[in-house]
Image: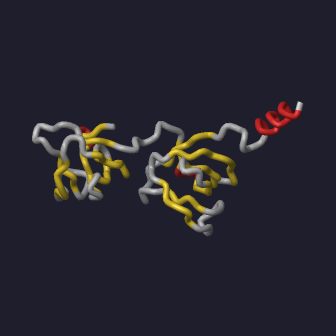
Amino acid sequence: MRLATLLLVLLLSPLGAMAQTLFVSQNDDGYLNLRSGPGTRFDILRRLSPGDSVAVLETVGRWYRVRVSSGQEGWVAGDFLERGPAIPKALFVDQTNDGYLNLRAGPGVGHPILRRMYPGDRLTPLATSGNWVQVRHVSGAVGWAHSGYISP
């Protein structure tokens, strides 16, 4: 009887309920602040990246109390969360006719080339603009690559 009661309490409690999983969406800043409370006046605990998944624990207005993959809990503005699919955590440079892909300073061929990237190089997506993806190269360089030459 005690076990059945304990299971019932766990199932009905917020901790026992299945948390909804949402994902950080793309935004102009390139990150979402995880805060200590539901509002911009609360301290920033850390920054979340587009594509990061969060488990929603509760809501207060447009603010969501969430748990991130590390187990840390905090609050985020719900306007910057979306249902999946998640943005890929990593992209890779595909094989090209030239044997490399240019990382550019902006989204278009008219922007200066920052460096060459080679097939298999790991990229972290940050933002999109048309057919261009802003990425962080494994070297740490940030720039833009045409989406036709990269894949998950």
Outermost residue to the right: 1
Q: Which residue is drawn at 68% across and 50% down?
A: 59
From the viewer's perspective, tell me whether residue 9 is left or right of residue 138: right
From the viewer's perspective, tell me whether residue 39 is left or right of residue 86: right
Count of all numbered marks drawn on residues in the image: 0
Q: In which quarter of the image is the C terminus?
A: top left
Q: Where is residue 101 in the image (x, y as percent from the top left)?
A: 18, 46
Front one among 107 and 67: 67
Q: Position of residue 74 (x, y in %)?
A: 61, 57
Q: Residue at x 44, y 54 (%)?
A: 27
Residue 11 location, quadrant: top right
From the viewer's perspective, tell me whether residue 150 is left or right of residue 125: left
Q: Where is residue 141 in the image (x, y as percent from the top left)?
A: 27, 58
Decide: is 122 above or below 6. Answer: below
Decide: is 59 above or below 34. Answer: above
What's the colour scheme?
A: secondary structure
Q: Quadrant of the N terminus?
A: top right
From the viewer's perspective, tell me whether residue 36 is left or right of residue 148: right
Q: Residue at x 25, y 48 (%)?
A: 145
Outermost residue to the left: 98
Q: Where is residue 82 in the image (x, y as percent from the top left)?
A: 53, 43
Q: Residue at x 49, y 55 (%)?
A: 48
Residue 90 location, quadrant: top left
